[in-house]
Image (cartoon, grey):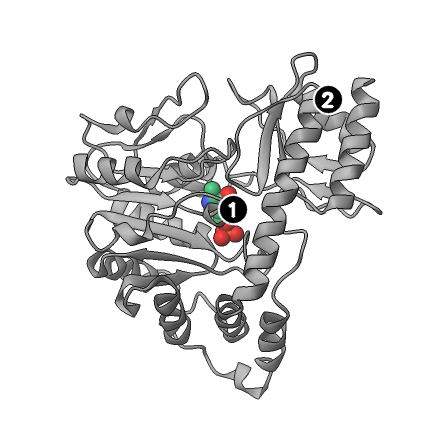
């Protein structure tokens, strides 16, 4: 705290990212990073971009990447917006689209960044309770005026709505912009990108951080009606004209074009998720059905916070969130087979199974 802080800075309660500690032999299952590493083609492209050309500013529109994403998603480049991580894309969406007269709506159990953006950008918000099974309830977003943001699959539960359920919501709430945050969609949920054509109120946000194993590169994007994308670009060009450097754009283009690496690693995460869920259930955990690269699980005999801290003592990091309904749970990233063995052994020791 400094007396020189603005009133805005004083009033913030920033998002707290999962820790990145330097503990030898650490099993890091707390921030949903990929255990498999990026496409080797992406790494080559990033290296090849480290030339004298770095003295020049990059393309402010990231045209090559937007064209590659347009081909991949079968849309036009005018439907694609890119940014420095999907957190930045989401930030622009809050300013450009979600800040309307009525409070923005999102589930009460969801990505903790949404209320942080509301405070930073001066949006009122209201939460819509998830149901008794922790599922997002689309009906809760009807009959109210506000714009909508939903993570699908949701975080930190990992549970997904169907494309049909979101299509119905888009039609029922055609009065309002709807942002669907698909950070985890490649691990088993139905993307709503195909709905963009028929729903001018839909913005779909995706990232290279999870299924493309490039969290360190900071590339995210949105797909939507050209008018929505133009709104995001107006905000971006009022904030930072060059969100993606040359190496980031080159690496992202190569990553999106490396379909075999993407499929192999994505399917390996899905397979490891199934065995993680089975091992946890064997130890007495209740595991929510996940379509993401993490599971959300609780043990009837042990508190989430105590388990997370006992795991940390054994150099295994998982994420624990404070707050009603979620604080019983651990959010555990799907790691490699050997990481999941370490986790399971540590949990068995803690629980005394
Ligand atoms: C990880 C995550 C993001 C942001 O990822 P970036 O690294 O900023 O692209 C966005 N939404 C959700 C729900 C996430 O879990």
Residue 153: x and y in percent read 45, 39
Q: Badge 2: how crowded within 10 Å, few (<14), some, or many (20+)?
A: some
Residue 112: x and y in percent read 48, 35
Q: What residue lies at 43% left-to-right and 16% top-to-bottom? A: 132
Residue 60: x and y in percent read 38, 73
Do the residues bearing badges 2 and 1 touch, measured as CB atoms within 8 Å?
Answer: no
Q: Which residue is mark 1?
A: 187
User: Does residue 329 appear anywhere in the picture?
Assistant: yes
Q: Which residue is mark 2?
A: 283
The residue most toward the left is 175
Q: Is residue 51 left or right of residue 58?
A: right
Q: Badge 1: how crowded within 10 Å, few (<14), some, or many (20+)?
A: many
Q: Earlier in the sequence, mark 2 or mark 1?
A: 1
The residue most toward the bottom is 52
> Considering only vertical position in the picture, is 39 above or below 215?
below
Q: Is residue 72 left or right of residue 218?
A: left
Name the secondary structure under disc 1.
Answer: helix
Image quarter (top left, top right, bottom left or bottom right) of the C terminus? top right
- Please name whichever residue, 106 or 290, is drawn nearer the observer in this view of the structure: 290
Q: Quadrant of residue 149?
A: top left
Q: Is residue 248 left or right of residue 172?
A: right
């Amino acid at each position: 705290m400094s007396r020189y802080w603005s009133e805005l800075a004083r009033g913030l309660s920033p998002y707290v990212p999962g820790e990145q500690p330097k503990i030898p032999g650490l099993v890091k299952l707390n921030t949903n990073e990929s255990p498999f590493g990026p496409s080797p083609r992406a790494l080559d492209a990033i290296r090849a971009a480290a030339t004298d050309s770095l003295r020049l500013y990059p393309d402010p529109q990231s045209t090559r990447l937007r064209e590659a994403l347009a081909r991949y998603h079968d849309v036009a480049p005018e439907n694609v917006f890119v940014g420095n991580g999907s957190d930045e894309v989401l930030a622009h969406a809050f300013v450009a689209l979600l800040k309307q007269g009525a409070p923005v709506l999102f589930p009460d159990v969801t990505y903790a960044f949404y209320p942080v953006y509301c405070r930073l950008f001066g949006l009122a918000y209201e939460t819509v309770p998830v149901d008794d099974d922790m599922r997002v309830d689309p009906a809760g977003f009807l009959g109210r005026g506000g714009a909508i943001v939903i993570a699908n699959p949701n975080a930190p539960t990992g549970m997904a709505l169907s494309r049909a359920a979101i299509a119905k919501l888009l039609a029922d709430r055609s009065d309002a912009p709807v942002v669907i945050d698909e950070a985890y969609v490649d691990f088993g949920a139905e993307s709503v990108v195909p709905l963009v054509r028929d729903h001018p109120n839909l913005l779909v946000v995706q990232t290279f951080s999870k299924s493309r194993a490039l969290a360190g590169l900071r590339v995210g994007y949105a797909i939507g009606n050209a008018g929505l994308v133009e709104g995001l670009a107006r905000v971006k060009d009022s904030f930072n004209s060059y969100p993606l450097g040359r190496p980031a754009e080159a690496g992202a283009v190569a990553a999106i074009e490396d379909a075999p690496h993407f499929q192999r690693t994505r399917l390996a995460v899905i397979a490891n998720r199934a065995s993680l869920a089975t091992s946890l259930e064997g130890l007495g955990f209740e595991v929510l059905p996940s379509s993401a690269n993490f599971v959300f699980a609780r043990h009837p005999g042990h508190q989430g916070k105590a388990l997370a801290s006992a795991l940390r003592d054994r150099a295994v990091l998982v994420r624990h969130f404070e707050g009603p309904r979620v604080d019983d749970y651990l959010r555990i990233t799907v790691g490699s087979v050997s990481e999941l063995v370490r986790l399971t052994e540590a949990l068995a020791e803690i629980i005394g199974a």
